[in-house]
Amino acid sequence: MVLAAQRPILEIAGLNKWFGAMHALRDIDLSITAGEKIVVCGPSGSGKSTIVRCVNALERYQTGEVRLEGRLVNADCDSLLSVRREVGMVFQSFNLFPHLSVIDNVTLGPRKLLKIGREEAEHRAMELLARVRLADQARKVPSQLSGGQQQRVAIARALAMRPKLMLFDEPTSALDPEMVKEVLDVMMSLAHEGMTMICVTHEMGFARAVADRIVFMADGAIQETALPEAFFCGDCCARARQFISHVMKERLASQPGEP
Amino acid sequence: MSTIANSNPTDGGPSRYHARSLVIWARTNLFARPIDVILTSGIALAAVALIWAVLPWAILDATWQGSSRADCRPDAACWAFIINRSGQFIYGFYPATERWRVDLVFLAFAAALLVLLNRRLAGKQVAAAFLILVFPFLSFVLLHGGIGGLPRVTTEKWGGLSLTILLGVAGIVVSFPIAIVLALGRQSEMPVLRWASVGYIEICRGLPLIAVLFMARILLPYAFPPGTEFDPLALAVVGIILFESAYLAEVFRGGLQAIPKGQAEAASAIGFGYWRTAIYITLPQMLRMVVPGIVNNAIALLKNTTLVVILGLFEVLNIVAAGAADPDWLGLHAEGYIFVGLVFWTLCFGMSRYSQRLERDMRSAERA
Ligand SMILES: Nc1ncnc2c1ncn2[C@@H]1O[C@H](COP(=O)(O)OP(=O)(O)OP(=O)(O)O)[C@@H](O)[C@H]1O
Ligand SMILES: [Mg+2]
């Protein structure tokens, strides 16, 4: 039926998470339909990473639930590993496997988990590397690549598992300014191809261009969920406005330092 | 110095440059200040005097051939003893006609090691699997015999340098997988597993090997019915493995802790569970890091194998000492111990140099 098609791919309901006594996430409700792109922003320590990490159970949460296509996700679920295969994640610090070549980084998951033969896995990996414009770097090891190149390999590695949902946790904030664009370009083309994405990022240009919704967080709670037009026209809560102007100011401050 | 010469190939001929840089190096390092001049010439003089004193005894007047002490000059070294007895020093009391079995075992080991350690050769996984899973059993069957037409050679007959190396290799190879399990267990989230690993490691690490071997010899017979016979070699190997696996486990744990948390997280994010993460991500990275630690342990273990004399086994040190008590060669302790010292030093120095080269290779591979 039509209803089935519109059923959200990811549902987060009443999610609460404590680190010891620290209440890191408060009553988070969020649902995403297939093909939707969500940008999460907010000040440091507001719980953005923690939300994303709860979605593929890198963190254990205490109350509420996270469901991927109806299946419960938490740190000790039976379906945990199969859920993680369907969710791709890109980290701020790349986390490529330093002992493997670029192509092996990309093919390891498909070969060992999806049981795809080496030849086919490498063929698919080369396609993905071409998509992130790194086909010529396939035989290098990660330490021979620049930060921007490493992050694009990390994106290819996540895509190799054919995920239904991609999570990005500040993928560009560890990069030198001149490399940010090459990573954002890849993310944008991914968005245009219809990938469902949750991106934690402070790249407001990217958010404006790609996001279907912008989620603003502070103090472990979602303060505001807005369409990009509304968000950037100041049609939102005072804290979000303050945050936006803060980010913009930082942007301007860093501009003269750029080549 | 050679690196300086290599990096400046345009400056004159390489040999001229090398000689000049040697002079410059000596001037800046050995003769810079008066105190340096005094120290350098003092040490050089002492070295010359030492060589002068030892050379006639050790080389010039030494006897190299002979069948007993009577053939040797009394005032110089009697290397004839070592050469005459070299078969026994290497193979112990292993029958001369069966020594090819020992050679074969060491050839197999050397081949596997070569594949494992040489960067250019493929098949590392096969070699490692062979070394850990097949080699210990294969070598035992071959050395011990008693099946397939091979005459039985009981373990009391094994000895000499081959026993030393056998104990060292068995100690490292068999301890290796045990130590990996212990290191993983120590980091496990399951309390029972963690406590068991910590308990084992701390107990075995706190005991000197000599105490373990004494206990095996003196206490074990009390724990079993009178008349129970224990194979001394089996006791020695078990004692060494108990001891060595605890040490290696700590080396491995150090390596595991040095791997950034993001590595395991990235593996989880792909969908790898505990074992896949360990096998494909954390253990391979850990093993690269701990090569110097493993070599360090192997060196210590090799020297520790001399203690198995407590169980009545004659590895190279004690078989040479016993040889010097033989009426034919009575009293040739100095030659014997110098020989044993050289053997151990060569083995340990070789391992140490190799580990340094490996470290350098890995560092340059990461930077490349
Ligand atoms: N493993 C942890 N143990 C204890 N506290 C933690 C842990 N991880 C995060 N926190 C705390 O939880 C809160 C939310 O952290 P989170 O990393 O989600 O913030 P963030 O919004 O991603 O911030 P940033 O922009 O700096 O990445 C912070 O106050 C942080 O100190
Ligand atoms: Mg964060």
Image (cartoon, rainbow, N blue to C red):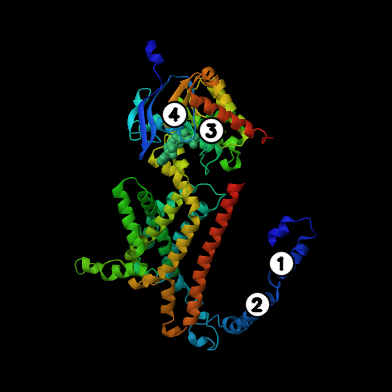
User: Contact (CB < 8 A) between labels 1 and 4?
Assistant: no
Pinpoint residue A156: horizontal percent, then vertical percent.
Answer: 53, 31
Q: Quadrant of ligand 1?
A: top left
- Residue type at the position of mark 3: Pro
How busy is the neighbourhood of tag 4: few (under 14 within 10 Å), some, or many (20 plus)?
A: many
The residue marked by circle 1 belongs to what chain?
Answer: B
Residue assigned mark 1: B25
- The residue most toward the left is B225
Q: CA distance from mark 4 to mark 2?
A: 68 Å
Of residues B62 and A159, the one drawn nearer to the viewer in this rendering: A159
Residue assigned mark 3: A171
Residue A87: image tag: 4
How busy is the neighbourhood of tag 1: few (under 14 within 10 Å), some, or many (20 plus)?
A: some
For marks 2 and 1, the one nearer the N-term is 1
- Residue type at the position of mark 1: Trp
Picture residue at 38% right of the left edge, 30% below the top: A26
Picture residue at 46% right of the left edge, 58% below the top: B294
User: Contact (CB < 8 A) between labels 3 and 1?
Assistant: no
Q: CA distance from mark 3 to mark 1?
A: 50 Å
The residue marked by circle 3 belongs to what chain?
Answer: A
Q: CA distance from mark 1 to mark 4?
A: 61 Å
